[in-house]
Image (cartoon, rainbow, N blue to C red):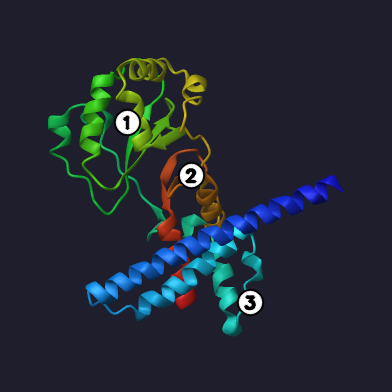
Amino acid sequence: MMKEAFDEFLKDQREQRAIVLTLSFLGGGFLTLWFLKEFLGIATDGILIAMILLPLIIYLVVSGRVSELKTPGGLEAKFKEAAQSNVSAASETVAVEDVQALAEGEMLFKSIVKVRTPDPTKPLVLLLTIGKSDAPYSRENLLNAMDVYEQHRNFKFVVFRDAKEKFVCYMMSWAFRGIIDKAALGDEFVELLNSGATGELLRYPNMVNETITTATSNIDALKAMTEKNIEALVVIDPKGMVAGVCEREQVLSKLLLNLAG
C-alpha cells in the first residue's frame, strides 16, 4: 500500500514538473516568434510547427508518457524509433559529437595553445589526468589553460581520466573555474589531482561521475539531462573511454527531424 502511494506521488511530481517545463518553453518560444516577426520580419511558419511539436516531446519525455504518443499516419512509430535508437546511431552526424582537446603539454602554455585554433563545430573539452605525478599540474598552469579555452564558445567540460585514459568524472567549465580561481581551494584541488585522490575529488560540488554510454537511447539521454538540469552529457564507449558529447539540442533536433521525415 505504501509503495503504491509513493509511486503515485512520484508520478504526480513528474507530471507537474513536465507541465511547468513545457509551459515555460512554450511561452518563451511564442515570445521569440513574436519578436522575429514584428522586429526582424522573419517568416515563422516553419518555426511555429517546431515550437508546437517540441513542447509535446518535452512533456512526453519528462512525464514518462513517451509510450502514449498516438497519432494517425504512424507518427508514433517514427517517434518511438528515434527515441529508442541509441546515441551512437548519430555519431557520424550530430547526436554524439566528437570532442576535441589540445594536447596536455600544449594546453599549459598560452603562447602555444593560441597557435592552434579549435574546430568551432565540435565541443571543446579540457582533459586532465588524475595522479599525474611525473609531470604534475600547477594552479597557474590550469588558470592559463582556462583563459585560453574560455575564449571558445564550444568549451563544455573539464573531464578527468585515470592513468589509462579511462573516464573518471567531469564538471562544467564554470564550476572548475570557480575552484581554481580561489588560491587556497585551487591549490588543494590541484594537490589532490596530482596525488590521484579520486575519492576526495568526487566530493567536490558539481563533480559528476555519472554519464551515458554509446548504447544509451536518445530518450534516456534526454531524461538524464532533464534530471540533472544540464544541456549536455559526456558519452563513454564500452571500454570506458570518452567517446564524445551528447547535447540536448541535438537530441531534440534528431527527434523532430525523424517526425518530419
Residue, far right: 1
Q: Which image quadrant is residue 181 in?
A: top left
Residue 229 percent across, percent down from the top left: 49, 47
Q: Where residue 259 sits in the image (x, y, percent)? A: 49, 75
* Front residue of 239 and 129: 129
Which residue is more in the foreground, 132 or 256?
256
Q: Dot 1: what SS?
A: helix
Tell me if residue 46 comes above or below residue 92 in the rendering.
below
Q: Which of marks 1 and 2 is in front?
A: 1
- The Cα–Cα distance between marks 1 and 2, rounded to whole angstroms, is 27 Å
Looking at the rendered structure, the kind of residue marked 2 is: Asp
Residue tagged 1: 177
SS at circle 2: loop
How far is the residue under mark 3 from the one under mark 2? 34 Å
Disc sitting over residue 70 in the figure: 3
Residue at the spot of label 2 = 237
Residue type at the position of mark 1? Arg
Element carrying mark 3: loop
Which quarter of the rendered picture does the C terminus lie within? bottom left
Please tell me which of labels 3 and 1 falls first in the chain. Answer: 3
